[in-house]
Image (tube, rainbow, N blue to C red):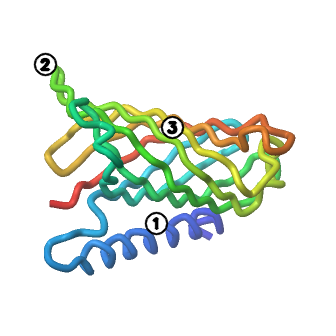
């Protein structure tokens, strides 16, 4: 067999996410888009031999102009992921809704960059398949560095920490490191 079951599931997952993002983007009315950015990423971490992630991102207005005057803006990042766990060989599916704070573009002689940080809820389909997560409800925090390749394309390096915040034990959490390619819709 050319592809393992995990690889086929990952391919189907990415394809379904890409098609969903196209439908969401094209179903907009009167020029208001439901989706502004899509990202695909791959990485790994402790216990997770592979982690494939799809991110659907749109701007999030902050209440009471909380960021007014700061070189920051906020986005909502709906993340969908599939992972393979070293300890059990099991595949798990994930979903998250992360509130992102992103810096405005920082331009240097070496290129344009941005920084991001985020936090939000994270659901996992099979928490018992890893010795580090004990509940289906977890929290996701992330730090990232993005490189602006063109006006539409971004290359991101993200570090995620997924844990349950002390709700239950074990609560060692999982650190996942991803490389992502993002496209911004015009």
Residue sitting at x 69%, y 36%? 46
Disc on res. 43 = none
Local crowd at mark 3 within 10 Å, few (<14), some, or many (≥20)?
A: many
- Residue 174 vs 40, above or below: the answer is above
The reply to whether dot 1 and dot 3 touch (C-beta < 8 Å) is no
What's the residue at 66%, 45% (across, down)? 49
Cα gap from disc 3 to disc 2, whole angstroms? 27 Å
Quick one: which residue is furthest to the right in this view? 169
Q: Marks 3 and 2: CB-CB under 8 Å?
A: no
Residue bearing the label numbered 3: 142
CA separation in Å, label 1 and label 2: 35 Å
Give x and y (percent) for residue 71: 23, 30
Q: Answer left or right for 129 relative to 110.
A: right
SS state under label 3: strand
Calculate the distance from the C-alpha at mark 1 to the C-alpha at mark 3. Answer: 21 Å
Which mark, by number, is residue 109? 2
Q: Please identify the quarter of the rendering in which residue 72 is found.
A: top left
**x, y percentage for residue 161?**
61, 37
User: Which residue is farthest front?
Assistant: 64
Q: Residue at x 71, y 55 (%)?
A: 137
Residue 33 occupies quadrant = bottom left
Please state if 46 lies on the left or on the right of 11 as rendered.
right
Q: Which residue is mark 1?
A: 14
């Amino acid at each position: 067999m050319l592809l393992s079951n995990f690889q086929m599931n990952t391919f189907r997952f990415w394809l379904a996410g890409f098609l969903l993002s196209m439908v969401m983007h094209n179903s907009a009315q009167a020029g208001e888009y439901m989706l502004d950015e899509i990202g695909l990423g791959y990485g790994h971490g402790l216990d997770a031999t592979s982690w494939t992630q799809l991110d659907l991102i749109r701007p999030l207005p902050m209440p009471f102009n909380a960021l007014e005057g700061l070189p920051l803006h906020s986005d909502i990042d709906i993340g969908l992921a599939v992972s393979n766990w070293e300890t059990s060989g099991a595949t798990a599916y994930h979903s998250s809704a992360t509130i992102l704070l992103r810096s405005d573009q920082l331009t240097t002689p070496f290129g344009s960059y941005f920084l991001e940080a985020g936090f939000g809820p994270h659901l996992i389909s099979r928490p018992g398949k890893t010795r580090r997560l004990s509940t289906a409800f977890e929290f996701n925090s992330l730090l990232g560095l993005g490189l602006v390749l063109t006006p539409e394309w971004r290359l991101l390096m993200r570090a995620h920490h997924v844990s349950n915040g002390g709700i239950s034990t074990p609560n060692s959490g999982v650190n996942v490191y991803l490389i992502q390619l993002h496209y911004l819709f015009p």
